[in-house]
Image (cartoon, rainbow, N blue to C red):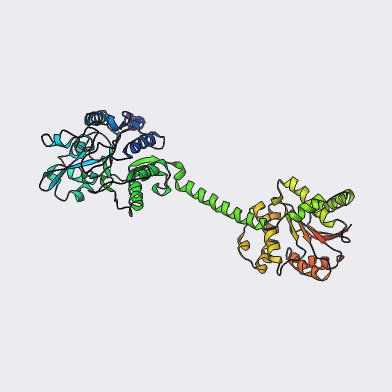
Amino acid sequence: MSAASQEHEEKPAGRKRTLVVGVNGPPAPGRAPLQDAIHDAQAMASVLQQECCGFELVRPPLLGEEATTEQVRTALLDLAESLQEGDFALFFFSGHAHLLPVDADQDEIYLVTQTFNPAHLKRDQNAHLSLRWLRQVLFEHEQASSILIVLDCCYAGKFADSAPDLYLDHLRQRLRYYFGEPPGQSPSRPGGIRLALTATGASTAKEQDGHGLLTGHLLAALRGDREQAADEQGQITFGRLFDHLAQVLASSGQEPHFFGSGKSLVLATHPDLSLEKRREREQEAHEAARRQRLQEIIARHHDGFLQDRLDSFVGRVSELAEIRRQIDELLPTGGYLTITGQAGQGKSSIIARLVEEQTREQGGRKRVAYHFIPLTPPSDYQVPLLQNLMARLVLKYNLSDLSLASASRAALCEDFPGALQAIAERGGREIIFILMGWTNCKPINRPARAISAFCRRDRVSRHLASSSCWGLVPTIRCVPSNCSSRTGSTRCPI
């Protein structure tokens, strides 16, 4: 590596230095003190020093009575004197500005400090801080890489008129590219970034919600609270910031202005606002909304009946052991286990107990695929039955939920076997519990036809039709880890 290239790589990055001033202003004829200028400066100083912005205060913010003409003048001169090649300087002022006509077609604008006295300007136009002086001292700094001046005050839009008289003709148009190719009369660094952001034109700047209107939106963007102000890398550039301000202030009657060049200037960096992170948040929000929809489908199935059966469950130790054994036998290949028996013998209580066991094993009742069909189901109850079971499986295994958006029985019957296949392909094993509350043989065929849609064969309906027609007919569906294996059905009388 050459000495020149090594020197280039080891060259330290320029510093970021800032001076912040806030003056509510002394009362004067036709000018009431502001309410929030000091708050603006305090908040801006805090934000600029945060890691996202990385500025260093050249001195504590000049606020209220501290912000005399001499104090602000000295601080600005100290800031200008301290700047080196590659540095970035930002001057922020929130307060009043004073318009002083000096010629028939020219106004001079002064920052209203705590000791501002317009009578002094009649004898000495340099008695207080004019925008022309600010431009000469700071804006046209000969070494600093970047200069940004932010003025949240009335008449600040007249900043354009503070240039040397040579450039007064069509100054607004020429200021847009003035510092891109500085003329020979300007001492500013060639190619340096020079920008001025102003709150308004010759109208009065506004205050709202504890801040100047411009400053309030500016603070939110710099903090990272306005995602639209960041670029794809999560950077708040001047260009993106100004476009955002222009949009949010469009209907406020206070149009922001900027002069100079260098819209790529980075004011703050928020990695969390990068395009990649935004997409991640969008995906997370989409997934959260999806899970919420599934939870709502599951919530439609009330657990009162289940809890009632659990509260009344006693004994049945041997029957439970036998059912567990048969379930274990069916899991490798898949199949159905139907529990039959006379009414009142506790079939539904046994199913409830098995569901509760799975709840403890799976870590929550919503992770168990079960459904209790009411004694008097409405017409086409196959739809909510399948939706509920599908929602539980989709939520547990992160499956596609497209069919759940439809109330079509055909679509649900078509997609349910696919869901079971997907579970099996992932190596999953699932036990599905269904309790059908019909008390005679004839209606059994109706839910039987719905359950037969779980597989693309008619085995289930044939099996249920041959089951005893006593009371409730609970059914357990076992999903194997390999759907291509043979499935079978078993009846377990109690």
Query: In the image, is 187 to the left or to the right of 226?
Result: left
From the viewer's perspective, is residue 311 above or below residue 24?
Answer: below
Query: In the image, is 175 to the left or to the right of 329?
Result: left
Q: Position of residue 113 (x, y in %)?
A: 24, 34
Residue extending furthest toward the bottom: 442
From the viewer's perspective, is residue 105 above or below residue 127?
Answer: below
Q: Position of residue 132 (x, y in %)?
A: 18, 39
Q: Residue at x 12, y 34 (%)?
A: 124
Q: Position of residue 417 (x, y in %)?
A: 70, 62
Question: Which residue is nearer to you in this view: 420 or 403?
Answer: 403
Question: Could one spot residue 427 in this view of the protein?
Answer: no
Q: Quadrant of residue 472?
A: bottom right
Q: How many marks?
A: 0
Q: Position of residue 337 (x, y in %)?
A: 82, 58
Q: Quadrant of residue 406?
A: bottom right
Quadrant where the image shows the N terminus: top left
Quadrant where the image shows the C terminus: bottom right
Question: Could one spot residue 449 in this view of the protein?
Answer: yes
